[in-house]
Image (tube, grey):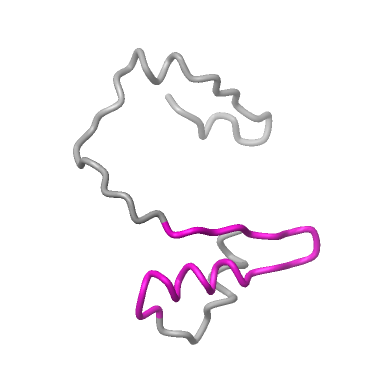
Amino acid sequence: MFCHITANWRGCPLVSREMAVNRMAGTTRESLNIEVSLDENTYEAGIRVTDEELASLSIERDAFHGEWGIE
C-alpha cells in the first residue's frame, strides 16, 4: 500500500498534514481503496507496552516470513 501512496504524491511537496492526508486519500488502484483521516489528538510520549500486555494480544504469524514477527 505504501508504494502506491508514495507514487501518488511523487513530485508534490508535502507542505502540510492536510495535503499529505489528501494525497493519501486520493490513492486508488484496482481493488485498492485507501481511507485516511487526520488524527489531531495529542498523545503522551514514552508510553511502554509491557511484556504481559504484548503477550495478551492475539497475534498470529503468517506462513510467509513468519520469522519476521515479534520475538
Residue 4: in magenta span: no
On screen, 6 above or below 38? below
In the picture provided, is 60 more to the left or to the right than 16? right
In the picture provided, is 39 more to the left or to the right than 28? left
Quadrant in the picture for residue 14: bottom left
Quadrant in the picture for residue 29: bottom right
Q: Residue furthest bottom?
A: 11
Q: Residue furthest front?
A: 41
Q: Nearer the viewer, residue 19 or 48?
A: 19
- Looking at the rendering, the stretch of residues picked out in magenta corresponds to 14-38
On screen, 41 above or below 3? above
- Residue at point 40%, 54% (across, down): 39
In the picture provided, is 65 more to the left or to the right than 46? right
Report x, y in % for residue 1. 61, 58
Residue 26: in magenta span: yes
- Residue at point 44%, 76% (across, down): 19
In the picture provided, is 47 more to the left or to the right than 19? left
- Residue at point 57%, 67% (across, down): 5
Report x, y in % for residue 15. 35, 80
Report x, y in % for residue 36. 54, 59
On screen, 70 above or below 46? above
Q: Quadrant of the C terminus?
A: top left
